[in-house]
Amino acid sequence: MRVSDRYKGVLGWFAEHIPVAETELVYHDPFQLIVAVILSAQCTDKRVNMITPALFGSFPDAPSMASATQEEIFELIKSCSYPNNKAKHLRAMAGMIVTRFGGLVPSDRDELTLLPGVGRKTANVITSVVWNSPVIAVDTHVFRVAARIGLTPGARNPLQAEMRLTREIPERQRSLAHHWLLLHGRYICTARKPDCNGCGLSEWCAYYQKEKGIKA
């Protein structure tokens, strides 16, 4: 099967069966989304959503978080993974938003990556979710699922996968496609035991066809 046919089938199935797909992180503005995404690194969205109400209750915006001590932030996020590093990054990130960007979260991806704790993936999430930019954020779920299905043959790292997905997926679907693949990886195509019997993508999936001995 040609890779282009896989994209056509997979995107068509998602568009028909999951027309609405959104982040599961709870936030109220771009700053709070950045905080939530930083906290979500190697941590579940469920855990992050348990942490952020108290965190945002104390430090709802960049100026208040920038004025907090690292220890104060740590106490509110200590139940997530790597709380020391994340507390450091959150305080520094908030400080840069205040001092360099006038208290407003930048909408440009390159400017976002200047913020402590914000890499390319996080910047793509922010611009995609908040401003509906036609970019693909490749996290561990997206990287795994795209490779399994056969959408990113030969991609050895998230950047290569992002470049292939961006090239193949129409601009209007890129923001949705990130959530489609992420949620599929979170609930169906899991790392240890993908639920192939409960998956609607088997017709186009390279992994399923290989497992069943089906000639692609």
Image (cartoon, helix red, strand yellow):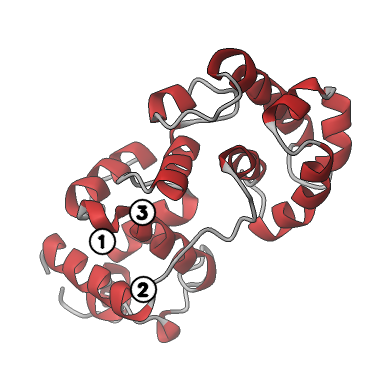
CA gap, disc 3 to disc 1? 20 Å
> Which residue position is annotated with label 2?
19
Residue lying at 79% horizontally and 36% vertically, measured from the top left? 59
> Which residue position is annotated with label 3?
175
Viewed as shown, does residue 118 lie left or right of 174?
right
Residue 150: give its label.
Answer: 1
Residue lying at 32% horizontally and 41% vertically, measured from the top left? 156
Q: Does dot 3 land on a helix, a strand or a loop?
A: helix
Viewed as shown, does residue 149 lie left or right of 178?
left
Mark nearest the camera among 3 and 1 is 3
Dot 3, crowdedness within 10 Å: few (<14), some or many (≥20)? many
* Residue 213, image quadrant: bottom left
- Residue 103 in percent (x, y) is at 61, 24
Q: Closer to the camera, 1 or 6?
A: 6
Dot 1, crowdedness within 10 Å: few (<14), some or many (≥20)? some
Which quadrant: the N terminus? bottom left
- Residue 69 in percent (x, y) is at 85, 22
